[in-house]
Amino acid sequence: RLEMRDFGVKVSVIEPGYFKTLITSAENMEKNFLSIWEKLPAETKASYGQNYLNEFLVSLRKMQKRCNPDLRLVTDCMEHALTSRHPRTRYSAGWDAKLLYIPLSYLPSALTDLV
């Protein structure tokens, strides 16, 4: 954003939370992860263990339930950034971005890791 300022280009950063899209589809993510898992050497799989794989797949499914289906929140931010006379520097779309991820970004790494 700052690098482009010297060229007269204004950049707005849109920071969405979790939204229901093809990227966050539990089925797609699970399929891709299992495909990668199958290609790992047996030693690496043993190092992580079957329990790691199972817990990861469960967490993927839980994450899917938290995804917001209302993409309008993101597209409204995009529209404002593109059409506003004075666009904001940053846009946070979704309650999780506003209440969790943005505040976490200001905390020291040790506290963020704990959370």
Image: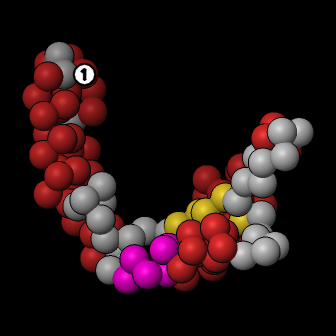
Q: Is residue 68 above or below residue 40?
A: below
Q: Is residue 21 left or right of residue 82?
A: left
Residue 73 shown in magenta: yes
Residue found at the far right of this picture = 6
Label 1 neighbour load within 10 Å: few <14, some 14-19, many 20+: few
Using the image as rendered, state which of residue 46 and residue 34 is in the foreground: 34
The colour scheme of the drawn protein is secondary structure
Tell me if 7 is positioned left or right of 45 in this view.
Answer: right
Task: Tell me which residue sits at (48%, 74%) in the image.
Answer: 75
Which quadrant would residue 36 be assigned to in this image? Answer: top left
Q: Is residue 37 visible?
A: yes
Q: Quadrant of residue 13?
A: bottom right
**Taking the image as drawn, is residue 111 in sight?**
no
Magenta-drawn stretch, dominant element (helix, strand or loop): helix
Q: Which residue is mark 1?
A: 44
**Residue stretch in magenta:** 70-75
Residue 115's place in the image compared with 74, above or below, is above
In the image: residue 73, left or right of residue 52:
right
Q: Position of residue 96 (x, y in %)?
A: 53, 76
Residue 63 or 113: which is nearer the viewer? 63
On the picture, is 93 further left or further right than 60? Answer: right
The image quadrant that residue 92 belongs to is bottom right
Residue at 21% of width from left, 41% of height from top?
Answer: 33
The residue closer to the viewer here, 47 or 86, is 86
**What amino acid is found at the position of numbered circle 1 in the picture?**
Thr
* Quadrant (top left, top right, bottom left, bottom right) of the C terminus: bottom right
Q: Where 24 sits versus 47, above or below? A: below
Position in image of residue 76 (x %, y %): 54, 79
